[in-house]
Amino acid sequence: MERNLSLLTDLYELTMMNGYYLNDRRDEVAVFDVFFRQNHLITYSVAAGLEQVCDYLINLKFSADELAYLKGLNLFDDGFLEYLKNFKFTGDVYAVPEGTFVFPGEPILTVKAPVMQAQLVETAILNLINHQTLIATKSAKICYAAQGDSVMEFGLRRAQGPDAGVFGARAAIIGGCSSTSNVLTGKMFGVPVSGTHAHSWVMNFPTELEAFRAYAKVYPDATMLLVDTYDVIRSGIPNAIKVFDELVAAGHKPVGIRIDSGDLAYLTKKARKMLDDAGYTYAKICASGDLDERSITSLKLQGAKIDLWGVGTKLITSEDMPALGGVYKLSAVFDGDRVIPKIKISETSVKITNPGFKTVYRIYDQAGMAQADIIALREERFDTSRDLTIYHPVDRWKKTTFAAGEYTLKEIVKKVVSNGELAENLPLSLKDVRAYADKEKATFWDEYKRIDNPHVYKVDLSDGLYKLKTDMINEIRRG
């Protein structure tokens, strides 16, 4: 989907570009990393948004109208505006595939490009990666809580705008949702769409029974009835059963019921018994209404009889953590083929950046389960025929050793854009991205994915990167 988002940027990106142009540094090649920092709600994240980043980069250009607007700001040199007329992204992008589990501090996307280009794209890349990664992660947590039940994304009406609704639904599918209520997302990305009817349908008929019959007449083989408009137990379910009997007599098979309010544990247990007693053991019970991973976990513990979960507001807004907090930091510049590492120092240790042109390796045990990650300089090599010891990046006394022959090492970062052109195997269909995400999810123990107090996944700095970082910090502090 081609969209030109050249002005989807912060003003200072353009003023810095203008400055680089006037200081004759337009051809200097720079490396920037996208990563997020640890906080009490982030244990892992599910990378998403890469397809939209690639689409943005390869279609980036400035129209005459946009250039006229920039000229009218009276901030930019005429020569710089002339340069923008033929602007094209010509750099390289390295990233983990969408659906990959990623952890604080890891470069999940790296841009290597002429500094003016690399600077311009910062804001849009962060916008695309931060939002979709946030929603994919929330989706993964909700789906984990559902323990294999289907979760339907119902969030469009509560999303912060059309793009958040469309691409948030896309991210929710990557995270594990089985379908979306968002028809535009279904069309754009080829994913299943789902939905039943609203309370207004029931209210617009003289009686609830008439409303159910009318809906069943229109969709006799896809009848899912919303039973909580008036009274779930006294009217909703009994009326649904009457309509189900009529459907079966006519040779159709009803799907089930949906409950959108009330005590879902109590109501679904009662509903299950009533449906089963009527012979509808196969009828599904769908629940919705401000659900998230914690309420789903609680309902599961209470023995709620729910087969399908419709999750909206708290998924599409990631209510408990509405921003991922990903950042885009300079890590190196190039002098010809020579890499000159860059580092940002802070009194807060977590805000000290990792210098250099880097990649990420994942360590797997013999069963194929992920054990730890190593952030390494791209030129470093590892001998897997030897023991491998990793260390905590700050508390170096904490260490783990993997015995030779009992682990494998896989580089999880791939080159996705080369010289401004998309890699041959991209873009993937959303179906393929989801399949990869499901496979990726299965390589992590439940202890890392649990909702409360998850086990901390180990992320180490390679020996070469740790030495480089320590040496640079010491040199800067010496003045």
Image (cartoon, grey):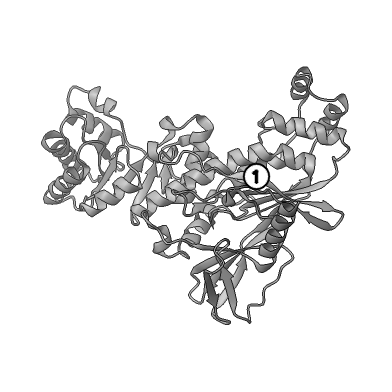
Badge 1 element: strand
Is 404 placed left or right of 355 in the picture? Answer: left
Which residue has dot 1 on it?
328
Q: Residue at x 47, y 60 (%)?
A: 441
Question: Residue at (51%, 30%) from the top-left corner?
Answer: 162
Category of crowding for the residue at label 1, using alpha-carbon neighbours closer than 10 angstroms: few (below 14), some (14–19), many (at least 20): many
Q: Tell which of 202 and 461 is nearer to you.
A: 461
Q: Vertical placement of 108 versus 2: above or below? A: below
Rendering coords of residue 389 (x, y %)? 58, 74
- Residue 439 image position (x, y, % from top left): 49, 62
- Corner quadrant of residue 242: top left
Query: Which residue is drawn at the image coordinates 76% and 34% (left, top)?
Result: 16
Q: Can the viewer see residue 417 in this picture?
A: no
For residue 385, say whether it is visible: yes
Measured from the top left, where is residue 218 in percent x and y?
A: 30, 33
Q: Is residue 242 left or right of residue 328?
A: left
Query: Could you tell whether 231 is left or right of 391 in the image?
Result: left
Amino acid type, label 1: Tyr
Q: Give the residue furthest to the front.
A: 478
Please tell me which residue lies in front, 179 or 344. 344
- Quadrant assignment, res 1: top right
- Picture mark count: 1
- Image coordinates of residue 274 in percent, x first then y, are 13, 46
Is 137 placed above or below 460 here? Answer: above
